[in-house]
Image (cartoon, grey):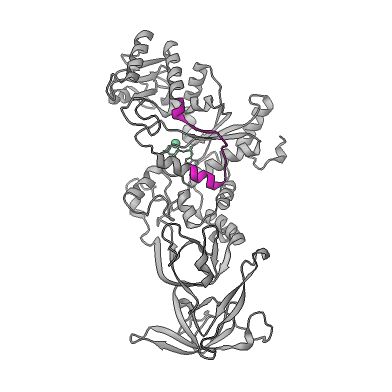
């Protein structure tokens, strides 16, 4: 395929182009290899978009493979959630859903081959001794006294390890490479350890489990992967993966490393996210404040906006931190195109319109989406009692306040201009109601009057509005890099105001039929999405996906 027909161009595609040109590979075959020990987050989404995106771009294939080599931390619920999340993002692995555990038998055979070649041995040092013997990056390691066991002895011990004759930790299988290598990964790395543990797929069949470093490269090879794309921390592991593949003489994928995606104001390590979930700092993995795909979905992020974001950040060879405002910008950009505009009042203040006949309803035209005519129009009810936003009235208006105040006029969106005639207070002096008059000649779009006012506000008819709960979110952490201070626990930086629940919101009647396949813009207050967990038919609950103010656009303008 010609370069100019493709969507992507970066240092990875340059390498792939070279490989196709030189004939090293004839097609492109990638994979996304999650470990099922947590839910996917936005960093994983970057990797998914990259691997599936490259395959699409080159007319190749991308597999989904669970790297399930660690029985203790892995569970089926994670497998299910990962599958759901990748589908939701819009990628398809066809019939190529694999598990590293599918290859346990093959990996065992490969290990036997290495033992027979004198390239692997059973070591009986303890874990502490092994780590002590490894040396440090600046001093060479020491060879284990068991390193020169005969092939026969190694084969016998390895077979008995598999048969369950030994306890956890009694022996390990190690590659015989070089205890003095400047690359610590080549100092006779452990290939198998004994673990009498139940595995989510193989049950109790195995009591020896391959180490990630032993399983990963061979799994890629078995699947005929051409380009093993992974994050930078594996750069130092590449010589080891190459060594294994060369010693075994099997298909050799090319490994390419890129920088992890990091976002400010969040944490991305699965261990830390699990900590937040297990200690109830958040409402599960899908809490709308979490950087997980399930959290973002619940909050109302769209797959398209996440994919656009992933494309925008591109791929880098050095670690950096991306501003979360860029992600939110991508979300707004997409929602602006697709959201249904509605009127909803979050903090209601009642208004009685004294010159509008009580008991009467006027149905007014409202536009569903100014960005897209095909969304059409709807009718919204107007009556003598309405709610406006508390914040749209000031008894003593400050200088630049152009909305409602005693004696002042304001336009009601899609309706009329009203004038505040009287302020009613409770015994504590709080404003509880306004009495206003409306000017019947100022109906929006009627062209009757050319009266102009500076402010337009949103409102709902009190009689017709339905009750709703609204959840407003702020960043989960109050500092840019919550995990950056090694002296402090990242949980100390949790933002105590990251969730605000408003119970008494009033929304236009059509929202009684809100569904999860629609995104809404509550005019002037943000983009909202029905909460899949707490919403009921009686009382819908809406999550604010993002506010309307685009901080990224501002930053970009300044630059
Ligand atoms: P762990 O520490 O448990 O290995 P992990 O985040 O690397 O955590 P994996 O399940 O191994 O989780 O990740 C699956 C794939 O996603 C890997 O190929 C990994 O490189 C990639 N990945 C994980 N985090 C990021 C990130 N922040 N940016 C880009 N890719 C990522
Ligand atoms: Mg990993």
Total count of labels:
0
- Which quadrant does the C terminus fall into? bottom right
For the point 54% across and 57% down, which residue is it?
517
Looking at the image, residue 89 sits to the left or right of residue 295; the answer is: right
Q: Is residue 352 above or below residue 498?
A: below
Q: Of residues 441 and 21, which is closer to you in this image?
A: 441
Q: Find residue 243 and report its horizontal and vertical position in percent.
A: 49, 20
Q: Is residue 344 above or below residue 45?
A: below
For the point 50% across and 57% down, which residue is it?
300
Quadrant position of residue 111: top left
Is residue 143 among what the camera can see? no
Q: Find residue 417 and report its horizontal and vertical position in percent.
A: 58, 84
Q: Residue 275: within the magenta?
A: no
Quadrant position of residue 226: top right
Q: Residue 92: within the magenta?
A: yes
Quadrant position of residue 425: bottom left
Q: Find residue 405 and report its horizontal and vertical position in percent.
A: 49, 85
Segment colored magenta: 83-103
């Amino acid at each position: 395929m010609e370069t100019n027909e493709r969507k992507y161009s970066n240092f990875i595609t340059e390498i792939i182009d070279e490989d196709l040109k030189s004939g090293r590979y004839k097609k492109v075959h990638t994979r996304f290899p999650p470990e099922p020990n947590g839910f996917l987050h936005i960093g994983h989404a970057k990797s998914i978009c990259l691997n599936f995106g490259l395959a699409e771009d080159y007319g190749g294939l991308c597999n989904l493979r669970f790297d399930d080599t660690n029985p203790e931390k892995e569970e089926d619920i994670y497998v299910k959630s990962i599958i759901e999340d990748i589908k939701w993002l819009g990628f398809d692995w066809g019939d190529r859903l694999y598990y590293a555990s599918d290859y346990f038998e093959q990996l065992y055979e490969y290990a036997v081959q290495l033992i027979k070649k004198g390239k692997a041995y059973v070591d009986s040092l303890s874990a502490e001794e092994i780590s002590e013997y490894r040396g440090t990056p600046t001093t060479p390691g020491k060879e284990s006294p068991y390193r020169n066991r005969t092939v026969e002895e190694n084969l016998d011990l390895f077979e008995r390890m598999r048969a369950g004759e030994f306890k956890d930790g009694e022996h390990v299988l190690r590659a015989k490479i070089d205890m003095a290598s400047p690359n610590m990964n080549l100092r006779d790395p452990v290939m198998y350890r004994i673990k009498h543990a139940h595995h989510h797929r193989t049950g109790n069949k195995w009591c020896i489990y391959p180490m990630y470093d032993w399983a990963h490269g061979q799994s890629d090879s078995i699947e005929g992967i051409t380009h093993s794309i992974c994050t930078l921390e594996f750069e130092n592991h590449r010589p080891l993966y190459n060594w294994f593949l060369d010693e075994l003489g099997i298909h050799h994928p090319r490994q390419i490393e890129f920088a992890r995606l990091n976002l400010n104001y969040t944490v991305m390590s699965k261990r830390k996210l699990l900590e937040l979930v297990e200690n109830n700092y958040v409402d599960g993995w899908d809490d709308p404040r979490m950087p997980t795909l399930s959290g973002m979905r619940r909050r109302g992020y769209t797959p398209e906006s996440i994919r656009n974001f992933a494309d925008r950040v591109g791929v880098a060879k050095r670690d950096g931190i991306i501003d979360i405002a860029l992600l939110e910008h991508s979300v707004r950009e997409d929602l602006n195109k697709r959201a249904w505009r509605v009127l909803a009042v979050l903090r209601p203040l009642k208004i009685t319109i004294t010159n509008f006949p009580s008991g009467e309803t006027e149905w007014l035209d409202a536009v569903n989406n100014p960005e897209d005519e095909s969304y059409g129009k709807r009718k919204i009810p107007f009556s003598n009692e309405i709610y406006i936003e508390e914040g749209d009235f000031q008894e003593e208006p400050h200088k630049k306040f152009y909305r409602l105040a005693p004696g002042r006029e304001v336009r009601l969106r899609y309706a009329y201009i009203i004038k505040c005639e009287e302020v009613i207070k409770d015994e504590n002096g709080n404003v509880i109601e306004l009495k206003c008059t409306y000017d019947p000649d100022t109906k929006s779009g009627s062209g009757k009057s050319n009266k102009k006012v500076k402010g337009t506000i949103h409102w709902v008819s009190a009689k017709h509005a339905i009750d709703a709960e609204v959840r407003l979110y702020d960043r989960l952490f109050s500092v840019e890099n919550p995990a950056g201070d090694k002296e402090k626990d990242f949980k100390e930086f949790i933002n105590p105001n990251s969730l605000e629940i408003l119970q008494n919101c009033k929304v236009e009647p059509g929202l009684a039929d809100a569904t999860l396949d629609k995104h809404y813009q509550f005019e002037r207050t943000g983009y909202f999405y029905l909460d899949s967990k707490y919403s009921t038919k009686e009382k819908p609950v809406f999550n604010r996906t993002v506010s309307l103010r685009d901080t990224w656009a501002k930053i970009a303008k300044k630059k």
